């Protein structure tokens, strides 16, 4: 699971008011090289919840992102490379996503988060 995916997921349990961001508990992760695409990064930037991305990157030991970011930073090649690496090249292979409201754990196995709900959660 890429950190881009983590940034788009939330807890959909019935009655949950604050299901984003899911807390990342990463047990195993890998870095997989992906070609840099500055246009994609500029396009996706407004859709990214920056604090969630920076926090998830910290969990896997990547501390190269600033605590806050704005669109003017997209003019920096160095910022684009760090943003790209965190968003697209870090893959969480094993771990869990935890709902901030209920504490419900959603496992990540072989890079795939299992967000299926139990019958009583729908």
Image (tube, helix red, strand yellow):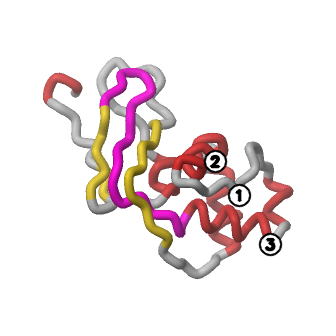
Mark 1, Cα crowd under 10 Å, few <14 / some 14-19 / many 20+, is some
Q: Is residue 121 left or right of 59 when viewed as pictured?
A: left
* Quadrant the N terminus occupies: bottom left
Viewer-nearest residue: 41 or 21: 21
Start-end of magenta stretch: 88-104
Of all residues shown, which one is farthest toward the bottom?
A: 35
Tell me the residue that label 2 is attached to. Answer: 54
- On screen, 66 above or below 81? above
Circle nearer the N terminus (1, 3): 1
- Residue 1 shows up from this direction: no
Q: Is residue 25 left or right of 44 when viewed as pictured?
A: left
Labels in figure, total: 3
Q: Is residue 40 left or right of 95 when viewed as pictured?
A: right
What secondary structure is found at the residue carrying circle 3? helix
Q: Distance between the Cα atoms at labels 2 and 3?
A: 18 Å
* Quadrant the C terminus occupies: top left
- On screen, 109 above or below 115? below
- Residue 108 shows up from this direction: yes
Mark 2, Cα crowd under 10 Å, few <14 / some 14-19 / many 20+, is many
Circle nearer the N terminus (2, 1): 2
Foreground mark, 1 or 3, reads 1
Tell me the residue that label 3 is attached to. Answer: 77
Tell me the residue that label 1 is attached to. Answer: 64
- On screen, 17 above or below 51? above
Residue at the image point whose x is 38% and y is 51% from the top = 27
Name the spot of residue 114 as percent of width and height, x first.
Answer: 26, 47
What secondary structure is found at the residue carrying circle 2? helix
Residue 72 magenta-drawn? no
Circle nearer the N terminus (2, 3): 2
């Amino acid at each position: 699971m890429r950190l881009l995916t983590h940034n788009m997921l939330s807890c959909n349990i019935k009655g949950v008011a604050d299901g984003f961001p899911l807390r990342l508990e990463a047990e195993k992760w890998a870095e997989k090289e992906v070609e840099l695409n500055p246009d994609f990064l500029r396009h996706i930037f407004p859709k990214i919840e920056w604090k969630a991305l920076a926090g998830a990157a910290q969990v896997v030991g990547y501390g190269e992102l600033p605590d806050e970011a704005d669109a003017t930073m997209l003019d920096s090649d160095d910022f684009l490379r760090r943003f790209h690496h965190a968003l697209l090249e870090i893959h969480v292979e094993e771990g869990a996503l935890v709902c901030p409201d209920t504490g419900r754990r959603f496992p990540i196995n072989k890079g795939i988060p299992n967000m299926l709900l139990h019958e009583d959660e729908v």
